Amino acid sequence: MAAFRLPVGQLCRTAAAPTSATRQLRALGHHRHASQQQLRWLATPVSAPPTKVGSQGPTAMVFLNMGGPATVDEVGDFLSRLFADADLIPLGRLQNYIGPLISRRRTPKIKEQYAAIGGGSPIRKWSEHQCAEMCKLLDLISPETAPHKPYVAFRYANPLTEEMYNQLLADGFGNGKGGRAVAFTQYPQYSCSTTGSSLNELWKWRQRLEGKAGPADHGKDGSIQWSVIDRWPVHPGLVETFASNIEKTLAEYPEERRKNAVLLFSAHSLPMSVVNRGDPYPAEVAATVYAVMQRLNFSNQYRLCWQSQVGPQPWLGPQTASSVEEYIAKGQKDLVLIPIAFTSDHIETLYELDREVIGESGHADTVKRVESLNGNPIFIEALADLAKKHLDSGVIASSQMGLRCPGCKSDRCLESKKFFAGQQVLAVR
């Protein structure tokens, strides 16, 4: 994995010749003369003149994510939507009965957890921040597709996909006016339960709000022309952000203990029924882990574990909490937790890892969590690089997007994949 250590504006410093996006971002960095204050983790400040409409603009950049309740009062609705989604939590023929039952029973406990982390999830704040800052960079490095307008579509919390789509229409996209939109998953590793579910929901509202369309006639009637960034598990910027954050955390240990700390990469688990169906998520998470360890030159021992199991059925393991307990019981107390499948903080990091796993370990001084990606400038620029390359490629979706799982029986998944992956390739500039 190529080195990716850089200040703001210097993206993708690889052994290969730099891409045009890389060169433009480097030039941007030289002209900005960013101060130390600008390099703080919270933001990637970008100053630019008013953006002109490019020859292929404007472009809507839509971040897809699970979302989270912004307030305690939203927890009930959030859980109801979550447990109703058979793509994420398959409960069989009794989904419509069992889902609401589980959500009602869990609501009081989950409300307490959100209250403990400040009264709500920060995922909307971070998603809107990341998307807006990325769009500022895109306006500078991809003027042909400017202005780039930021949108967020959550699967289970506000702003929901329906709300986002209506906002697109209100802003002048579609309704006979055409326009381009990019669905940019914020799950770096693809799963039918996450990215797949979000795209299924996007397809549903596209068909309801703009009329039924197939891949061949999509966009020809003045509807929004969609393309998809559906996975990016080993992008150099993603890898570098994780690796640099890990190095910061390792530096907190005394030098004589640093190399003996075990790195525990933690990702949201999946039901084994989904894994056995052929979901690509475990392999893509493992690819991210291996790429990060390559960047770290395999400086430490490591394992991949899984968190957030829900319900009685078997889930992918080992579980993060039990892994920490078992390592401590074996005498290994220097443990570094890395939330490898999340792009920002939410309940799984702030409560499950910080308060439950670390807080209840009895060794909060030696078990540490790596900072989430949040507003990291390297990460923001990685997002811009991904988007720029996608816009330049003219490709609708990755080649993997059209392949169903071997055991897939979902008609909705079939139709959604036909729509997003079955379109003709856009004209490459």
Image (spheres, rainbow, N blue to C red):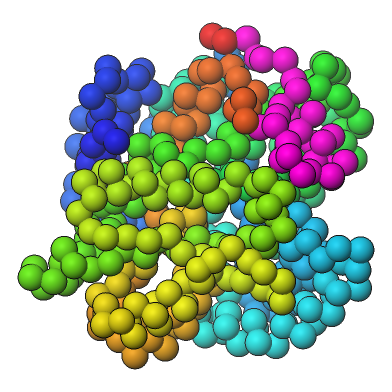
Is 76 left or right of 290, judged from the image as shown? right
Q: Nearer the viewer, residue 189 or 155?
A: 189
| Residue 141 image-quadrant placement | top left
- Residue 209, image x and y in percent? 87, 39
Determine if residue 281 is in view: yes
- Residue 150, image x and y in percent? 58, 41
Judge whether 250 appears above or below 414 on screen: below
Q: Nearer the viewer, residue 80 or 224?
A: 80
Asked if the stretch drawn in magenta spans residue 224, the answer is no
Judge whether 213 appears above or below 409 on screen: above
Judge whether 72 appears above or below 52 on screen: below
- Residue 193, image x and y in percent? 69, 53
How many numbered badges does the structure rendering display? 0
Is 250 left or right of 168, judged from the image as shown? left
| Residue 20 image-quadrant placement | top left
Is 348 left or right of 110, judged from the image as shown? left
Determine if residue 354 is in view: no
Asked if the stretch drawn in magenta spans residue 406, the answer is yes
Judged from this view, the residue extending furthest toward the left is: 256
Which region shows up in magenta?
Answer: 401-427
At a point 42% along the width and 88% down the height, the residue shown is: 360
Q: Nearer the viewer, residue 128 or 339?
A: 339
- The quarter of the image holding the N terminus is top left
At a point 70% along the width and 29% down the height, the residue shown is: 402
- Residue 188, image x and y in percent? 51, 45
- The quarter of the image holding the C terminus is top right
At a point 24% along the width and 50% down the height, the residue shown is: 298
